[in-house]
Amino acid sequence: MNGALFQGSWKITTIMGIPIRIHFSWLIVFGLITWSLSTYYFPKAAPELPAASYWIKGAIAAFLLFASVAFHELAHSYIAKKYRISIISITLFIFGGVAQMKGEPPHPKAEFRIAIAGPLSSFFLSGLFFLLYINTVGAGTKALFSYLAQLNFILGTFNLIPGFPMDGGRVLRSIIWKRTKDYFYATRKASSFGQKIALFFIFFGLFSIFTGFPGGLWLMLIGWFLYTAAQASYQQATLQETLSGIKVKDIMVRDIVTLSSSIAIDEAVDSYFLRYGYGGFPVVEDGKFLGIITLKEVKDVPREDWGKVKVSDVLVPHNKKWEVSPEVDTMKALELMINEDKGRLVVTEKDSIIGLITRNGIARYVQIMGR
């Protein structure tokens, strides 16, 4: 869920040290909610008000709804920070919001408390808006608070559905985790159940479309999103379990093939890329490591210039942050590759290069050793 979601979003503010971002899809839903409230809900709830008032209240309601979603995610984040789990950002998008946490809960109790904090915060807001509703006189304002009270109650209840990675699914994982003492098993079980819940949404949504029941398409979209997220969580758990306890030294390539920085691209392609089939090579000159050249850099050079352009002209200069120790966990190395968008890292020991670890190498290991 994390990759594509955070593309196409931008930061709007920071709360509790956490960047709050909105995805472009949020603007679409904001417009749809404002339109539907101002043309259907408010005219029916308060017919005596002028048309401009409907649009103003519709925009306010849409804004407060997404503020409620942000409050929901901040509740998760507040408890997570109590357990020293860093929060990278909170992103509001078409299906609500998501807090991107750096790390997993340390134990089942932490998982339960972090997960349940969101729905409880929504129920709190629902009660708050209900109190405002019963203590307000104007029909338009009462309709506004009534809408927000109902939506927050629905938000809290919906998130308690045990479909991982929803809050209810995380509560389920915490229960299974506590009983079995196995985090990876609990994650796989909760993710598998989450996929079944998602399929129910998809098929019920499809059934609703054919029977004329409202909201069928929306249910299918939510189901598809949940299924994708649950599947990704299942794969992540399998990956983490397979790589648990595996060090970089257990997977790294020890026999390194290096390129000279002075050779031309055509020689690098013919004598190295085609011969060995690797996606990248370390580049050295006089025993000094200069950087790495990959197929990406080669493809950026026009074919007719391969004989004139040298490896030194296109290599990616080395950066110390792209080095790892052989004793580092492979999962940490993989996370570094993903964060830095690198296909390989240099393995160093006492300032000397002793190997390379690559995404393809990790993928092969997982394919052979995984369940």
Image (cartoon, rainbow, N blue to C red):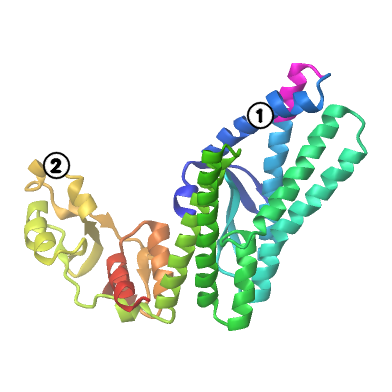
Identify the mark at residue 302; answer none if there is no mark: 2
Name the residue: 19% across, 70% down: 287
| Residue range corresponding to the magenta coloring | 49-58
The image position of residue 324, as x and y in percent, is: 37, 72
Classify 10 Å Cα crowding around label 1: few (below 14), some (14-19), many (20 and above): few
**Residue 141, percent across and down?**
84, 31
- Displayed quadrant of residue 216: top right
The residue shown at (71%, 54%) is 157
Q: Is residue 55 above or below residue 238?
A: above
Looking at the picture, tell me which residue is in the foreground, 356 or 367: 367
> Which amino acid type is marked by label 2?
Pro
Taking the image as shown, residue 225 lies to the left or right of residue 78, namely left
Q: Nearer the viewer, residue 7 or 30?
A: 30
Please give the label number shown on residue 36.
Answer: 1
51 is within the stretch colored magenta: yes
Q: Residue 76: where, in percent of width, then height?
A: 67, 59
Q: Quadrant of the C terminus?
A: bottom left
Judging from the image, what secondary structure is the residue with disc 2 in?
loop
Residue 210 visible (yes or no): yes
Q: Amino acid at mark 1?
A: Ser
Residue 251 in the image: x percent, y percent?
30, 77
Query: Which of 365/314 is in front?
Result: 365
Does the segment drawn in magenta span residue 152?
no
Q: Which quarter of the picture shows residue 88?
A: bottom right
Disc 2 crowd, CA 10 A, few/some/many (<14, 14-19, 20+)? few
Q: CA distance from mark 1 to mark 2?
A: 53 Å
Look at discs 1 and 2 and give the one toward the viewer.
1
